[in-house]
Amino acid sequence: MNKIVRTLILVAALSLASCGGRSGGLNKLLHSQSEMERNYPDFQADIVSDSLRMFLTDSAFVDTTSSYVAAVDSFYRLNHYQPIWIKNIFEDTRLDTLLSHIQRVPNHGLNPEYFEQTTITNLLDSLKTGFTNKGMADIYSSFRQLEYLLTKAYISYATGLKYGFLSPKKTFPNDYFITIQSPDSAHYAGLFAAADAPGAYLAKIQPTDTDYIKLQALLKQYDSLPDSLVSDSIATNYKTVQANLERYRWKRTTPPSEKYIWVNVAAMNLQAIEPGYEPVTMNVCVGKATTNQTPLLESELYYMNLNPTWSVPASIIEKEVYWAYRKDSTYLTKQRMKILKGTEELNPDSIDWKKINPKHFPYSIRQDSGNDNSLGRIKFMFQNPFSVYLHDTPSKRRFLMKDRAVSHGCVRVQNPMDLAYFCLSTKDSVYFDRLRTTIELPPVSKEGKRLQRQEKLEPLKNDIVFLTHKIPLTIDYRTIYTLPDGTIQFAEDIYGFDAKIRKALRLD
């Protein structure tokens, strides 16, 4: 028993005896006190308050490792830096409620140590058993540390489950450009208000998304397997589920649309969904993992370009076209490429290629339209700052390969005409056959074939086909995804993004 407590009991007993008090007086005194008062009779909450204020506001002490420093400070500022959790560590059930949620975070694919569970538990146990060999200064320091860690864990847990524990734009600053929701003042106000009785609040914020629940069920299945059945592939899948649970916690700000196109870079596939029609699914080719990763973004597809020419990007001129021409002077002719100075076409032979620095190529290069054009016969345009788009390709064999991360960043689609038909607001078969005729494809409808025989099937007058309604497009990256029929599929982590998520969540 703490020496201070023993002394207090002895003094009280002597006092009662000298006053002729009955033997039950001491028991009455002890029972009128809380366990906190019996163990720490001289405890002063204001000392912890002053310590918290200094810890949270003095730059020499601020916890720069936490994403929630401002939120924690606001939490205490509103409460005049008075402690929330540690006024009665022996009987306050809120501590047990919070710690029980933290202990169960593996159900969310998380590590309890992300919330510093061991440190919190050790501090709490030590304070409950008493520091027989420590002075009050150390005891107050431990109370302050416990108070801070509990608040940080509470804010992190609640905010992370609702919005994600990581900021994807900070984790992937050069790759992720999808806008997601972030906690606002209303979130923190509700969070702070619930601290007095956090049980209902923490239960309410548990994710309820169908796909999220499916992934949690997968984790539970893996956890129930005996060690003898846990193969390398199961262990890998387990890690994949953990990373994707975090992705499902990221909530987009863009409202969902009934008709949309979703490209999954990791799976190298495309899904086009429209109510009342069968889903359109196909393989795609995406950017190379080492040099030309496809950016993750959201936009709206708003027109189709038939028979496109291709303005060769400067990076491709520098790394490929320049050297191909130096090796074979017929290369540009074979590829039907033209050298342009402004709008003026130049004869490649008139250029002294040896004096040109490919990193600062002074001309532009354009490839004529046609079946062998690198963009194929159709490209699907949407606004973005990266000059990427969806497009056809003459290299059809690539779609049959497992590794389809072969492009310079754009997304090549396996069945461009299926996607073109999906994009049209009206499914007029003759109009679609006219579109096909424009890019030298035969009609497919009965009426289109009849009109062609009569030489009445006219191509469209314009190679630019604006869509009646813009179609939401998302290019995302998920190594677990759901097919339109609800089946869960795994994909390889071709860009190594899962590993970054796991590292940031301290899962490895």
Image (tube, rainbow, N blue to C red):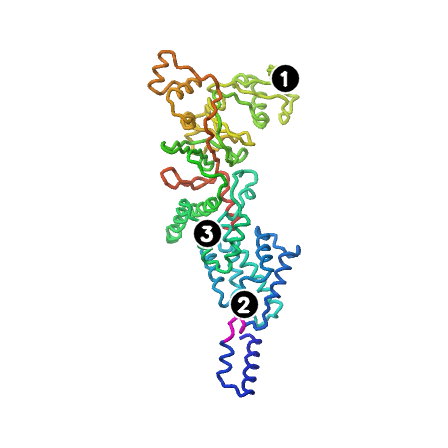
Marks 3 and 2, the one that precedes in the sequence = 2
Vertical comparison of 295 with 219: above or below = above
Marks 2 and 1, the one that precedes in the sequence = 2
**Do we see residue 508 in this rendering?**
no
Within the image, what quadrant is residue 447 found in? Answer: top left
In front of the other: 238 or 271: 271
10 Å crowding of disc 1: few (<14), some (14-19), many (20+): few
10 Å crowding of disc 2: few (<14), some (14-19), many (20+): some
Within the image, what quadrant is residue 174 found in? Answer: top right
Comparing marks 3 and 1, which lies closer to the viewer? 3
In front of the other: 500 or 464: 464
In front of the other: 429 or 284: 429
What residue did someone put label 1 on?
A: 351
Vertical comparison of 272 with 147: above or below = above
* Residue 220 relative to residue 169: left or right: left
What residue did someone put label 2 on?
A: 127
Percent from the top left, x then y, of residue 58?
66, 56
As drawn, the label of residue 205 is 3
10 Å crowding of disc 3: few (<14), some (14-19), many (20+): some
The magenta region covers 32-38
Marks 3 and 1, the one that precedes in the sequence = 3
| Residue at far left of view | 446
